[in-house]
Structure formats: structure tokens, C-alpha cells
Amino acid sequence: MAEVSPALRVTLPVAAAMRPVPPALPPDAPLAEAVRAMAIDSAVLAVDAEGRPLGILTERDVARRVAFRLPPETPLGAAMTAPLITCEADSHLWRAIALLRAHALRHLPVLDRAGRCVGMLHRQEVLAAVAGRTLSHLDALAGDDAAVKAAQAGLARSLLAEGVAAPDIVRLVSGINLDLHRRVMARALRAHGAPPVGITLLVMGSAGRGESLLRPDQDNGLLLEAYGEEARPAVDAWFPAFAETLNAGLEEAGFPLCTGGIMARNAAWRGTRMEWAARFGQWARQRAGEALLHAGIAFDFIGVDTAGSVAGNPAAELRRALGPMLRAQSALLGAMAAQDRQLTVALNPWGGFRRDRGGRTDLKLGGLMPLVAATRLLALQHGVEETGTPERLVALAARGALKEGEAEGLHGAHAALLGAVLQQQLLDHEAGRMPGSRVAIAALPRAEQDRLREALRAVRRFTKAAFAGFTGEVW
């Protein structure tokens, strides 16, 4: 397994940790043959004619059920463990670890989308890679959606205590959030049956950037496969109810409904690639108010792969299709910059922190959001496809749009602001308060206050220059 931090290990795909496919036999194969096959592995799968696993026979099963109990000619199906607990190859490792521990498994078959085994996870190896208190919090991730969402805070606190960097923890939290979106989407598909056309879930805003914290609201839409007029009645009849189920399921899982209506249940946030491109074009022509707000959120979209998605990567294709639109409507970026200029850092004219009546400072509104907005504009201008702010900074430096030292400084500022907000959210969660983005800076050590002040100064310098570059105004 790759040598990365504990947080990044559990966000790796299952495929990064699995062993090759174990021996596979039909369920009517004699046990003697199955036991001989264990000479090359510690488990044997029973599979159907299409290669889909039906059950598993492990060395422990042989010791408990077979040895000195069943004759060699007994069919494998009589001794195998079934039904089989499995995971998908594109699942995150944290989900597999939770299953291994919750069900006391030693082996976990990894399946592809067709239900065929593509590898095997072995408990001892996987758990050895994720040690410490992290494991106790991963146990809760085998529960229902609400339990998984609730477990994020404990896992984040444990990783912070182990010295894991805040950006890595936020990546983990975001990865869990995206996995919850997949689970809710899959459940909605099962409830409503096969869609009339292929679909991909678009997740936007902070979740799309991989920067969501403990309580992000919903920003999502649906990308539909292109279809002809003959399919429109079926599309119009199927999608409203499905989208309602999807958004209600996400709310139950711990993602509040978006007050601005940026959700799949709103027909304006569903459409084919051409319809989405036209929608972006309309926002570009309007260049005011709500259109700019929607564009800023939607430009950070990623596609969440689900069983209902169309072939290929529709979200990536949509992003590539937006390039010509931006070149044709270049004034959109200027209009977005003019609006984003209203985002100012949370420092007063004397260099102190701006505080609300409760003595707190909003480091999201007055720090992260200006940095995210300015980085997004430069990324769109230079054709950067990454959606995460750190990844965009790296890509911009590689293109020469930012000096390498400036990009590194902004990367550090982003990490400092993100870490302060995360720490405060965890404290608020433990105190029974709703996690937000307002930080009690006065309670922080002096060195941490100085670090945040310098981070905000760096963001102010960068954003003023970036916005001025689009608006033409002297800063």
C-alpha cells in the first residue's frame, strides 16, 4: 500500500490495497479440489457461470466445518459461507475497513460493476496500514448514513490528535461525504428502478472541491445522457420523483437542504450536457446577481460515479465543453471578479481580526471564500480542470500563472485557515453547538493567531491582484 498519511490511506480506493483474485470454483466442485486450491491462497470463492461470487471458503472454514467432518466429495456449496459480504473496487478503503471490523471478516472480496471478483482484501494487511485510535472511529462507518455522518467528527478529532494535517483530514471528511452521496444515489435508484436515460450525479460547491467540513449543505444536480424527443415523456415522468427521493435521502444522511434551491429536485439543476452548457451560457450572458452566484457554485462540480451513470466520464466531458463557452463569453469572468471583490478578508484597517458580537471571526467568509473565488477565476481563465483549491494552485504554478513561491504561500494560507475552522467545528460539536465557520481566535495561542493573520494578509494581496486583473480596476 502507498506510503501516505493515515488519513490518505483510508481515502484510497479499495483497489489500491487488494490482492489478486483468489481461486474460484463452481459451487458443485468437490471440497477436495477447493482445499487443494488453497495451496496458493487462504480462501476459495464459489462462483456462478458468469463468474459472480456466491460464497467463500476460508482456511478457518476448513478447520471448523470441513476437516474430519465432511467427505472430500462434498460439494463446495455445502461448506461455503453465504451470502457473501463484498465491497466495490471503487469504494474508499475506510468503507472496506468498517465492513471487515463490523462483521469480523478475514477476507473481503472486491467486485467490479458486473459483480465479478477483481481482488481480495485481507484483514491483517489492511488493518496494519491504519493503526491507532483511527480504527475505533472507523467502526461507526459501517452503520447507516446518519451514523456515518455523525462519526466524522470523532474520526477527525482522532486524526488531529495523531498529528495528521488538517487538509488531509478535510480530504477524508469530503471523501466520506461523497461516498454518502453514492450510497444515497444507489438507494434512490433501487427505489425507482432503472432510469429512462443514463445519469451522473453532479456535486458542486465545497464538496465538489473536496473541501467540505462537518456540516455542508446540498449543492447538486443531475447530468443526463443525451436523448431524443421520443424519450422526453419518460424522462419528464421519472426524474422529478427520483430527484425528490435523492435530496430527501441526503437530508436524512445529514446534508441540509440548500436554501438557494441548488439541488437535483429543482428542474433547473437537471439536464443533458447540451442543456447544462446552455445554462452556463445563459448565466454568462446575464452576468449579474443570481446568475453569478450559481456560476460560482456550479463551476466547482465533479461527477460522482454511480451504477446509473453513463459510460465514460460525462462530468469531465461537460467541463471540457465549457472551455469554448468561456472563450466566447469572456466577460463572465470579469463580472464574477467584480462580484467576488466584495469578499474581503477578516482583518480590520489596523491589522487586527474583525469580530462579530460574539467575539468570533468568520474565517470562511473572510478568508477561505476570497481565496477560493480568486483561484477559481484563474483556473477557469487558464483551462485548469482540477476543482480543489490546492490542486488548482499547483496547476496554475505549473502554467506560469502564479510564481511557485506565491502558490506555496497560498497553499499554506489555505491549510492554516482550513485547520482553524476545522478545529473550531470540532470544539463546537463537542460542546453541543452547531458547527459553523466562526472561530474564537482570542482563545488560540499567540503563534496560531500570528499564523492566521499572516495567512489573511497573503490572501488579501493575492485576491486584490487577481480580481483587478479581470476587472481592470487599480487596486
Image (cartoon, helix red, strand yellow):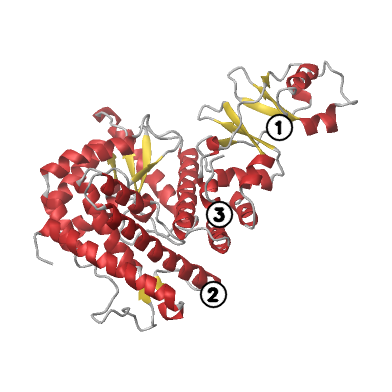
Residue highlighted by disc 1: 82
Q: Earlier in the sequence, mark 1 or mark 2?
A: 1
Q: Secondary structure at mark 2?
A: loop
| Image x and y of residue 344, in percent | 24, 70
Q: Distance between the Cα atoms at labels 1 and 2?
A: 44 Å
Instruction: Please give the name of the residue rendered at 35% of the width and 44% of the height, measured from the top-left corner.
Output: 302
Residue count near mark 1 (Cα–Cα under 10 Å), binned few <14, some 14–19, many ≥20? some
Q: Is residue 439 above or below residue 103?
A: below
Q: Earlier in the sequence, mark 3 or mark 2?
A: 3
- Pick the residue in front: 412 or 154: 412
Q: How many marks?
A: 3
Q: Amino acid at mark 3?
A: Val
Quadrant where the N terminus is found in the figure: top right
| Image x and y of residue 320, in percent | 25, 37
Question: On the rendered structure, is 220 left or right of 382?
Answer: right
Task: State the mark number for residue 275.
Answer: none
Residue count near mark 3 (Cα–Cα under 10 Å), binned few <14, some 14–19, many ≥20? many
Q: Amino acid at mark 1?
A: Ala
Quadrant where the C terminus is found in the figure: bottom left
Question: On the rendered structure, is 55 left or right of 404?
Answer: right
Residue count near mark 2 (Cα–Cα under 10 Å), binned few <14, some 14–19, many ≥20? few
Contact (CB < 8 A) between labels 3 and 2? no
Residue highlighted by disc 3: 148
| Image x and y of residue 111, in percent | 56, 31
Residue 228: quarter of image: top left
